[in-house]
Amino acid sequence: MAAKPDSKEAPAAAAPEKTGAAPAEAAAAAPKKASPLKAWLPAIVAILLAPAASFAVAQFVLLPKLQAKLAAPPVEGEAAHAEKPAKKEGKEGGHGEKKKGGKEGEGTSSADTYEFTNVVVNLSGTMGTRYLKTSFIVTGAKPDTIKDAFDENKARLTDVTLGVLSSLSLSDLEEPGAKNVLREKLVAAYNQALGSRVAEQVYFSDFVVQ
């Protein structure tokens, strides 16, 4: 009969143990409630540091690479491509010069011509009131012959020229084809004076009747 009081005291002793375990469970639950804030903390830090990281990458990585690329010499392929237009222009320029030289070579050289400048004569039948002023070039029948021939006989050929021109009347010059007739007369007179066919054609550069 003495063992019964012991059995009633056992539950009472167990009760304080349960009350002591409750604060421990509350303390363990507190960290679990704070864990969501810790989970977001790295993301918040990353968002705050992202602009600074982007600026640092642009300033110290991308910008130096861009500057180095701009300052670098052109690649050999690009340089060769850039030289092609210049070479093409040079070829065109040389071709143009060649053509120009060819055209000059095709023309009559100074040794193949003789020039009379500002020849003035009174026209026949005008009593000295009308005159002809002309300049013209005489071309040679053979290369490099007419200049020497005319220089050696300059006085005689000048007299021949004045004689042919002063024999013209105003009516002669007013006829159609008057210049062609005058060309034939001058060429025939020069060849007759020289005794051989030296002159071939006459080209007028100035022809004024007043």
Image (cartoon, rainbow, N blue to C red):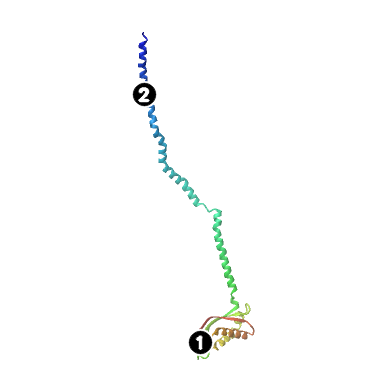
Q: From the image, which quarter does the N terminus lie in?
A: top left
Q: How many marks?
A: 2
The label number, if any, that marks residue 131 in the structure image: 1
Residue in view at x 55 percent, y 57 percent = 81
Q: Disc number at residue 122?
A: none
Question: Does residue 71 sit above or below 173 in this rendering?
Answer: above
Residue drawn at x 58%, y 69% as measured from the top left: 99
Q: Would residue 11 be seen by someone viewing this image from the given angle?
A: yes
| Left or right of residue 153: residue 65 | left
The residue closer to the viewer here, 64 or 53, is 53
Q: Regarding mark 1 in the picture, which secondary structure is present there?
A: strand
Q: Secondary structure at mark 2?
A: helix
Q: Is residue 166 above or below residue 76?
A: below
> Which amino acid, mark 2?
Ala
**Is residue 118 shown to the viewer in this render?**
no
Q: Which residue is painted at 38% across and 25% down in the image?
A: 25
Q: Which mark is residue 22?
A: 2
User: Alpha-carbon neighbours of circle 2 within 10 Å: few (<14), some, or many (≥20)?
Assistant: few
Give the x, y percent position of residue 51: 41, 43
Q: Position of residue 175 (x, y in %)?
A: 53, 86
The percent position of residue 31, horizontal first and vertical second, equals 39, 29
- Residue type at numbered disc 1: Tyr
- As displayed, is residue 23 above or below residue 189? above
- On the rendered structure, is 208 left or right of 184? left
Of residue 92 and residue 135, the one placed in the foreground of this image is: 92
Expressed as whole percent of the image width and height from the top left, the position of residue 38 reads 40, 34
